[in-house]
């Protein structure tokens, strides 16, 4: 079978963009398998994702596409392949365990190269899957020193994405800048209503009626980065704080897995602090 590729383009909207882009693919004898496009009505910005097959000269194809597009354009020409990722975790096992199982059964569209944690609590779990585990303690280290040690571990693998699977350390702007739009986090959707310790206890005391989770890219604003996926479930007066926490964990791992699959399949555009998802 010919190799499959994904073309991602976003730029200011112009008349005839779809015709010009698909025309280039046609001239290169490439077969379009699927095409999606969207124009943001407020910013008049154009987004297009195209799956196609055929043998390509990537440099020549990119040059011809750029000649047909506005000067201000983002163009990514990606082969369809599994992404290389490293997972950061602390002590909670639910998200990490779910990702390890999905990886073991080839449901993640990614290769987990390693797990890095500031505690060694989850090492026995990770060992069952034969994945390297790096215990990088934060004890007796200031934040820059700890992050330098994490960078040293990550440098072994050069991952395409970092996944924060309930990693409970705040990352500095300097760290985040080294992985722009490449760090994905999951958290409960009580933010910013219930922050700090015991959010589910706070929610229980407030009598909330829904709980949920949000997966997002990490930027300098921490939990305010572009949202990839969210979901909620209903709860009622019969739920204890512990029941809410268990239900919340189920939502978190499902939302994280769905968000990762979307990103790893090259379906996400970041536009300002929002996402366009095909």
Image (tube, rainbow, N blue to C red):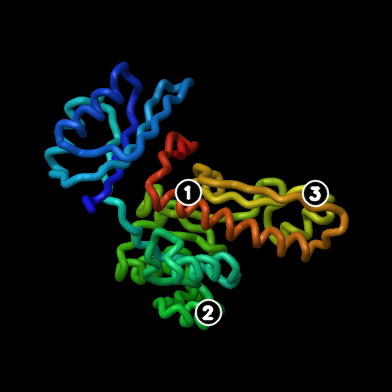
Q: In the rendered view, would you say 46 is above or below 15?
A: below
Residue 60 x %, y %: 12, 39
Label 1 CA crowd tier, 10 Å (few <14, some 14–19, many 20+): many
Query: On the rendered structure, is 28 left or right of 274?
Result: left
Farthest residue, direction front: 1
Of 225 and 14, nearer the camera is 14
Q: Is residue 190 among the parts visible in the rendering?
A: no
Residue 113 x %, y %: 37, 69
Q: CA distance from mark 2 to mark 1?
A: 26 Å
What secondary structure is marked by label 2?
A: helix
User: Which residue, given by chain and number where applicable, does mark 1 sit on?
Assistant: 217
Q: Is residue 163 among the parts visible in the rendering?
A: yes
- Mark 1–mark 3 contact, CB under 8 Å? no
What secondary structure is marked by label 3?
A: loop
What secondary structure is marked by label 1?
A: strand
Please report the residue visible at 76 percent of the width from the left and 50 percent of the height from the top. 234
- Mark 2–mark 1 contact, CB under 8 Å? no
Query: On the rendered structure, is 16 left or right of 165?
Result: left
Q: CA distance from mark 1 to mark 3?
A: 26 Å
Residue 110 x %, y %: 39, 61
Residue 256's label in the rendered image is none
Quadrant where the C terminus sits is top left
Of label 1 and label 3, which has the lower sequence position? 3
User: Which residue, given by chain and number where applicable, does mark 3 sit on?
Assistant: 208
User: Which residue, given by chain and number where applicable, does mark 2 sit on?
Assistant: 125
Please report the residue visible at 13 percent of the width from the left and 44 percent of the height from the top. 57
Of label 2 and label 1, which has the lower sequence position? 2
Q: Which of labels 2 and 1 is toward the front? A: 2
């Amino acid at each position: 079978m010919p190799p499959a590729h994904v073309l991602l383009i976003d730029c200011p909207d112009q008349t005839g963009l779809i015709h010009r882009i698909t025309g280039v693919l046609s001239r290169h004898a490439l077969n379009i398998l699927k095409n999606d496009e969207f124009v943001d009505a407020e910013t008049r910005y154009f987004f297009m994702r195209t799956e196609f097959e055929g043998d390509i000269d990537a440099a020549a194809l990119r040059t011809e596409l750029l000649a047909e597009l506005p000067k201000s354009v983002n163009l990514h020409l990606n082969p369809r392949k599994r992404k290389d990722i490293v997972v950061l975790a602390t002590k909670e096992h639910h998200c990490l365990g779910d990702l390890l199982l999905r990886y073991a059964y080839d449901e993640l569209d990614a290769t987990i190269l390693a797990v890095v944690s500031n505690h060694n609590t989850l090492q026995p779990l990770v060992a069952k899957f034969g994945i390297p585990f790096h215990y990088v303690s934060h004890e007796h280290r200031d934040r820059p020193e700890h992050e330098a040690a994490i960078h040293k571990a990550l440098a072994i693998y050069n991952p395409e994405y970092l996944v924060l699977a309930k990693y409970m350390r705040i990352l500095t702007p300097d760290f985040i800048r080294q992985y722009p739009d490449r760090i994905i986090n999951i958290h409960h959707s009580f933010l910013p209503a219930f922050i700090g310790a015991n959010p589910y206890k706070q929610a229980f005391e407030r009598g909330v009626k829904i709980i949920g989770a949000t997966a997002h890219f990490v930027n300098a604003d921490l939990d305010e980065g572009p949202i990839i996926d969210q979901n909620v479930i209903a709860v009622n007066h019969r739920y204890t704080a512990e029941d809410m926490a268990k239900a919340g964990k189920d939502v978190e791992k499902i939302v994280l897995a769905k968000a990762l699959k979307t990103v790893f399949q090259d379906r996400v555009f970041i536009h300002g602090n929002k996402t366009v998802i095909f």
